[in-house]
Image: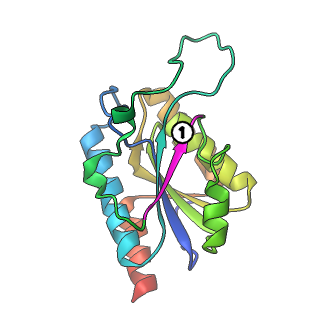
Amino acid sequence: MSIATLDPTTALVIIDLQKGIAAYPTIQPLAEVVGHAADLARAFREQGLPVVLVNVAGGAPGRTEQARRTGELPPEALDLLPELCQDPQDIVITKRSWGAFTSTGLEQELRRRGVTQIVLAGVSTSIGVDTTARQAFDLGFNVTLAVDAMTDTSAEAHTNSVDRIFPRLGETGTVAEIVALLDRAGA
């Protein structure tokens, strides 16, 4: 289902658009994805709605078959991309797992503000965005996914999340569609 409505108190949650991730090869040009995410952030701020900027500082413990980065990222890698124009009112969450709700306090921050819906953007579509969407859905939030404000290192994984998983978790839409709904709600 494509996006039909936004709740009165909807928050934007942008996943892992930070310096330590920006060099990874992605299927869509990262500059375009970041530009779309920045447009969303600007629109949410103009409506006085919460903007959450999430960065990742390391990985969860545990064995995996696939080699992965272990340990903490260097401090400069955590810096959010400047194109997001971080505002003092933004909520900044640092995670150490795939999803932004695990052991972070994000749910409490959103509930305290009366948020009932989140719009998700960022990287990686099939990992950080997907996991956060699943967690938000399980917690009872309405979920919208800004499909042109996210990307992945794998086209197959991105397509699987967008086409198969996201429609089961919420609504999908483009940044233009989401901004149009925000503009109508604020008018």
Work out whether 156 lies above or below 17: above
Work out whether 158 lies above or below 133: above
Q: Is residue 84 magenta?
A: no
**Type of residue at label 1?**
Gly
Residue drawn 56% across the image and 76% down it: 9
User: Quarter-wise, where is residue 1 in the image?
Assistant: bottom right
* Mark 1: few/some/many CA within 10 Å (<14, 14-19, 20+): many
**Outermost residue to the front:** 75
**Quadrant in which the C terminus appears:** bottom left
Q: Secondary structure at mark 1?
A: helix
Q: Is residue 63 visible?
A: yes
What sort of colour scheme is used for the picture? rainbow
In magenta, the rendered stretch is: 90-96
Residue drawn 26% across the image and 49% down it: 82
Q: Give the left or right position of residue 43, taking residue 109 as reference.
A: left
Instruction: Tell me how many marks there are.
Output: 1
Q: Position of residue 126 (x, y in %)?
A: 53, 35
Q: Disc 1 marks which residue? A: 128
Q: Is residue 142 visible?
A: no
Q: Position of residue 142 (x, y in %)?
A: 64, 64
Q: Position of residue 26 (x, y in %)?
A: 35, 30
Q: Position of residue 102 (x, y in %)?
A: 67, 43
- Nearer to me, 182 or 93: 93
Residue drawn 50% across the image and 26% down it: 72
Q: Magenta-highlighted stretch: main secondary structure?
A: strand
Q: Give the left or right position of residue 85, taking residue 47 as reference.
A: left
User: Quarter-wise, where is residue 23 in the image?
Assistant: top left
